[in-house]
Amino acid sequence: MSVPPMILDLTVASSDRRPVHLWLPLFLLWPLALVLGVLALALTITADGVLLALGRRYHHYTVLLVRSFEALGETRGMVIRFSNEKTAVDMTVQ
């Protein structure tokens, strides 16, 4: 089981300015995401049931939602670095 990301550490450094360092607590957003996720799960289960009753073959919205949450959980530990001659951006998801 993967643990969702808890902190986003963002640093933006420019050659002519002071570097900006942001620490964003993502764990504060997880209760809201949980409520929205439960509502979305109820809607996708309903949509899959209706499409199954109508005889449609491809009705995998619930699987898509669950896999999306799994992919979100796998972003923990991701490091992104961009830089050019003027600006450098470092983002770490912890």
Image: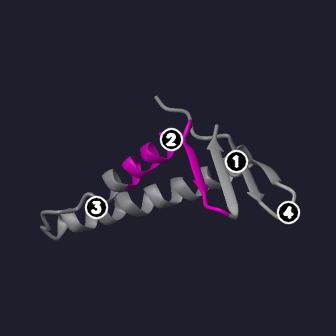
**Does the magenta run of residues contain 81?**
yes
Q: Say which element carries label 3.
A: helix
What residue range appears in magenta? 65-85
Q: Earlier in the sequence, mark 1 or mark 4?
A: 4
Q: Earlier in the sequence, mark 3 or mark 2?
A: 3
3 vs 1, front mark: 1
Q: Residue 47 placed where, x, y %?
A: 32, 66
User: Crowding near pointer 1: few (<14 within 10 Å), some, many (20+)?
Assistant: some
Residue at image mark 2: 73
Residue at image mark 4: 17
1 vs 4, front mark: 4
Q: Earlier in the sequence, mark 3 or mark 1?
A: 1
Q: Say which element carries label 1.
A: helix
Work out how far the residue at label 2 is from the one at label 1, CA to CA, in angstroms: 12 Å
Residue at image mark 3: 48
- Do the CB atoms of the residues marked 3 and 1 lie less than 8 Å apart? no
Mark 4 is on which residue type?
Arg
Q: Residue 67 placed where, x, y %?
A: 37, 48
- Residue furthest right as drawn: 18
